[in-house]
Image (cartoon, rainbow, N blue to C red):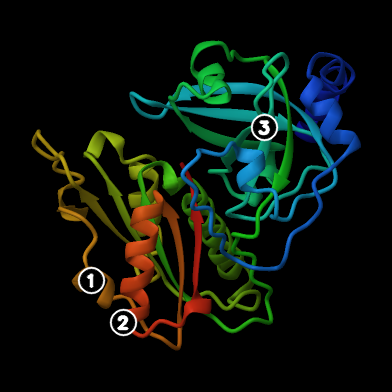
Amino acid sequence: MPVAMRVSCLLSATARSFSLSCPAAGLLCCRLLGPGSAVSRRNMSSKRQMDHLERTSNNYRQNTLYPAQVCGIINESETVKRLRIAVHPDFTFKAGQWVDFFIPDVEKVGGFSMCSSPGLLQREGVVELAVKYAKHPPAHWVHTTCTVGSKVAMRVGGEFFFDPSPSEPSVDLLLVAGGVGINPLYSIMLHTADLLRLNQASGGRDYNIGSAHLCYSARNTQELLFKSSIIEACREFPDKFFCDFHVTQQSTDVDLQLLPFVNHGRITEEVLRKHVDPQKTLCYLCGPPPMIESISKTLMDLGLPKDRILFEKWW
């Protein structure tokens, strides 16, 4: 049976059962949050911690809530689980977007960025989410209760994405991630790799793809998610993909395979300066709010226009 057909059959029972067991999903199916303005950044500063639906109330959302089913779980790190989720055949998203994540019998709605590419969805009918452990009910459920076969529902949202058309001029991507903020940027990197492969197959007639440089900061190398795959992409496209890993609290020796890519300390102005061209660079940032604010200011001081700095803040 083809993958798409298997996924469709798998999800038919999920669709029937989910609306009965998740009151929040039923409510939001009837009263969807409307689309916000076409602004590629959002200011979410508040002394009171807001939940995902509050923080993103002004963001674009699709109109459909899709049933889904967990079909794989791996430990990406000691604190992060990666879910592989079979989705409805009509489910679509752009690289960098997130989902409203509805769980039966869990009142709070989660908000998690996809860490897979739209190409994986097209090929296999699945998406992937990497979720860090937290006491917040949706993340806690992922780490303590979720199993292969668990039924959920998801709705795509967000204005933070990379979705070039073949006619657009090329840009050089600067991707800056802090901690689990790597998720949407990894999706963008994977999507860029898919587009480069399309170009190779067509003799370069499809997309105008520039370079992509990733600056990724975490406490230590154990918390650098997807590091092996990132390095593999850099080796597959040595003239297109580049990465710098930054560790701020490394207490053990760095693995020899990682050593050429690892820098000790935070991402500095000196590091960023090497990768900023005000005419060609398009920067995507995702991480803790203080990091985003600091790096945004540094990039503007380096001459990068504000409208070429796109960010997503997560708590």
Q: Which residue is mark 3?
A: 101
Q: Secondary structure at mark 3?
A: strand
Residue 186 at x, y percent in the picture: 47, 50
* Sequence-first tag of 3 and 1: 3
- Which residue is at the far bottom? 279
Mark 2 vs mark 1, CA separation in Å:
8 Å
Along the line of sight, the residue nearer the viewer: 123 or 273: 273
Decide which of tag 2 and tag 3 comes sooner along the chain: 3
Q: Is residue 131 left or right of residue 231?
A: right
Q: Residues within 10 Å of mark 3 (few under 14, many from 20)?
A: many
Determine contact: label 2, label 3, CB under 8 Å: no
Q: Residue at x 13, y 40 (%)?
A: 254
Residue at which label 1 appears: 269
Would you identify the image quadrant in which residue 129 lies?
Answer: top right
Earlier residue among tags 2 and 1: 1
Measured Cα–Cα span from mark 3 to mark 1:
36 Å
Which of 55 and 166 lies nearest the eye of the viewer? 55
> Residue furthest toward the front?
47
Q: Is residue 221 visible?
A: yes
Q: Residue at x 37, y 39 (%)?
A: 225
Say whether marks 2 and 1 touch (CB < 8 Å): yes
The x and y percentages for residue 113 are 57, 43
Mark 1 lies on a secondary structure that is helix
Residue type at the position of mark 2 = Leu
Q: Is residue 235 something that shows in the picture?
A: no
Q: 10 Å neighbourhood of mark 1: few (<14), some, or many (≥20)?
A: some
Residue type, mark 1 in image: Glu
**Measured along the vertical axis of the image, is residue 158 above or below residue 23?**
below
**Amino acid tagged 3:** Phe
* Residue neighbourhood size for the residue with mark 2, other residues' Cα within 10 Å, grouped as few (<14), some (14–19), many (≥20): some
